[in-house]
Amino acid sequence: MSDINRTPWPDRVRVAAWAALVLVVVWPRLVGFTTDSDAFIDVARTFLEGKGLAQSVVDFWRPAIPDPLGMWPPVYPLAIAAFGALGVALPLAARLVSAISYVLFALAFHGLARRAGGRPFAFVTTLVVLLGPGLAQAGATAWSEPPYLFLLTLALATAWDLVHDEIPSELQATVSGILLGLAADTRYLGIGLVPLVFVLVARRARGRVLVFWTLGALVPVALWAAHNLAAFGRPFGPELPPGVRDGSQGLRATPISGLSVTAFHPISGVVVLPRMIAFASRSRAVTGASSFHGPAGSIAREPRNVGHPRVRIRSLIVTGTPSSAPAGAPRCHRVSDARAALRAPSASTSTNALCRVPSFAI
């Protein structure tokens, strides 16, 4: 790395202090754990117990328990296990890994921005990125995003040096490639970036330097892909259950008349029925919300009662909406006025077209 790209230590201290200050503000305001967090901690626990990289918690992603890790790559659970081996409680270790990675990401991003646009540009962009609510939340939560972003950003910064240094070294190329490979072993999304960064590096790097970078990037990915092939017959983890592939968020929606999950699609032990306040279908006449003052004339035809709206078989989203006939649906308003007059003991009342879909969960 040339001297012009080298970040002075005072600047690094400032950036690290900014990131730490963000964490101090955000950390106490978050629970810090989600379902994915529980799964990461469980994998770290089973690894420390000598059971290998396996998951034993009940989760709708998993076809059976305990089963080999594959839905997520291994770097983040292994980092949690490393802190756990030092005596740190695993829940705290999971958040510490994310927090430390958040600070390291800030340093790596500042270095990359400094290479691209200079010192003032690096300070401004780093501060804007650190204050992003999503990234700040990830830094204080037991998620794998912070270590992934740190490894990816550091890999990009070292790849930048490979492209711009006059005489890049083979060791430099190997380290850059390994960092990108480890990023891909933290989040599967990183695998798609390997060929893109290869194109960037191949612009200047040639011969042994390019070979060493390629090997460094591909070996970690290949090792984990081989593990998945042996465990699941797929290079990138187990196949999702049918309900998840259909977009039901892992919960199998059963018809109103059904009370159990069919044996053909076991996802979880919970049967979920849609529960919502649903609007009437657009094709039906409705009793619109209105108020009536004074007598009303007779109406020749009454609308049909509002029934349940249509619901997609594989979704909990209602497809029907209130009636939208031309010119404000005057017939619906007349019908509504007449019904209101018949029902109301006084001169004013109101009705609406909402109906509740019967629902419950076991």
Image: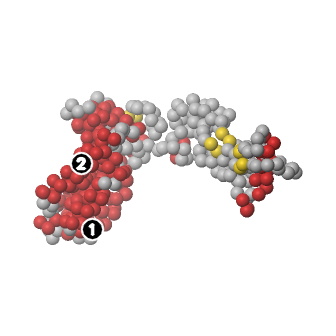
What numbered label is drawn on residue 21?
Answer: 2
Q: Position of residue 272 (x, y in %)?
A: 57, 36
Q: Position of residue 116 (x, y in %)?
A: 24, 67
Q: Which residue is mark 1?
A: 202
CA gap, disc 2 to disc 1? 39 Å
Name the kind of residue labelled 2 in the image: Leu
| Rendered image quadrant of residue 25 | top left
Name the kind of residue labelled 1 in the image: Ala
Front-most of 193 and 50? 193
Q: Position of residue 174 (x, y in %)?
A: 20, 57
Front-most of 346 and 239? 346
Is residue 158 visible in the rendered image? The answer is no
Task: Tell which tag, 2 or 1, sits nearer the viewer.
Answer: 2
Front-most of 337 and 19? 337
Residue at position x 60%, y 41% in the image: 276
Residue at position x 51%, y 41% in the image: 250
Q: Is residue 130 left or right of residue 334?
A: left
SS at badge 2: helix
Q: Position of residue 28 (x, y in %)?
A: 30, 40
Is residue 191 visible in the rendered image? The answer is yes
Residue at position x 67%, y 44% in the image: 354
What numbered label is drawn on residue 359?
Answer: none
SS at badge 1: helix
Query: Please, is residue 181 above or below residue 118 in the view?
Result: above
Residue at position x 12%, y 57% in the image: 9
